[in-house]
Image (spheres, grey):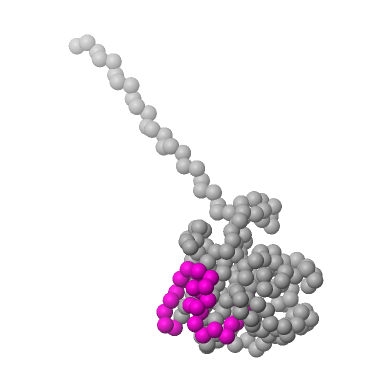
Amino acid sequence: MPCTRPPRHNTRAALLLLALAPLAALAQDPGAASDNALPELSALLECRSGYEGFMAYVPVLRDPLRAVALGWRPQPQTNPFMVEYRLNAPVTVFGRQSDHIAFAGDGVVAVLDLADPRTLARELQLETGVDTPEKAIFGREARASEVTGPDGTTGWIESAIINVSNVDSHPGKTLAGCSYSLDAPEPAEPAVSDPVAPATASPATAQPR
C-alpha cells in the first residue's frame, strides 16, 4: 500500500530505526501529565494513540521512580540511542507478547523474540525501507491528519508510522512499534510577480524631408 505523505515524511520514517536517532523528542516539554491519564501502552506501540499520547510518557522517562510505579524496570543502556525497560506484565503488540520495550527518537518499540523482522512486516503489509542480509527496516503510515498546532495555528500535520526493524545491539530480535510526529506547516513560498515589461518608446513622428 503506497504512502500518501510527501517524500520528506516517508524518508524520515524509513530511517527512524536505521539510525536510531537521539532522543530529541524527549527534550521537549510536554507539560505535566498524570500517570493515571497515560494512554494504553499497547495502543501507543500499535499506532492507535497520537502524538499527545506519546509525549504524555516523557515525564515517566525522565523519572525512574515514575517508571517503577508503572511496573517498568529500567534496563542497562545497551544501545546509546535507546532507553529500555522490562515490564512486570507483558504487553501485546501486533499479536505478539513482549515484556521488553524501548523508546528511541520520536518512537516506541517492543523488542520481540522474532529473529526475522520480514515475517511481521509481511503480516502488517509494510513498505520496504532497507532490506539486506544484515539490516531490515520496514514501515507504513498508519495515520496522518491536519491539526491545530501548539502555537494555535492550523495546518500542522500529526502522523503515526508503524516501524519494524532489526538492530545490531539486539541480535535475534525484532523491534516493532510506532513513531509519532507533529510537523509545522511548510513555509509559504513568496509570491512571484510578473516581471515589469520595459517601456516601449513611441516611434518618432516622421518628418518630411
The residue under the point 64% across, 82% down is: 98
Q: Is residue 98 above or below residue 12?
A: below
In the orientation shown, which residue stands out farthest toward the left? Answer: 209
Of residues 92 and 160, the one drawn nearer to the viewer in this rendering: 92
Residue 168 point in image, percent of width and height = 51, 85
Q: Which residues are magenta?
A: 106-134
Q: Is residue 185 above or below residue 83?
A: above
The residue under the point 51% across, 46% down is: 190
The residue under the point 19% across, 11% down is: 209
The residue under the point 50% across, 69% down is: 126
Of residues 159 and 76, the one drawn nearer to the viewer in this rendering: 159
Residue 141 point in image, percent of width and height = 55, 64
Instruction: Mark yes or no: residue 23 visible.
Output: no
Instruction: Mark yes or no: residue 99 visible.
Output: yes
- 42 left or right of 70 in image: left
Q: Quadrant of residue 158?
A: bottom right
- 194 left or right of 98 in image: left
- 41 left or right of 19 in image: right
Q: Is residue 81 above or below residue 187?
A: below
Is 93 a magenta residue? no
Residue 14 point in image, percent of width and height = 50, 70
Is 116 a magenta residue? yes
What count of labels does the image hold?
0
In the orientation shown, which residue stands out farthest toward the top? Answer: 208
Q: Quadrant of residue 72?
A: bottom right
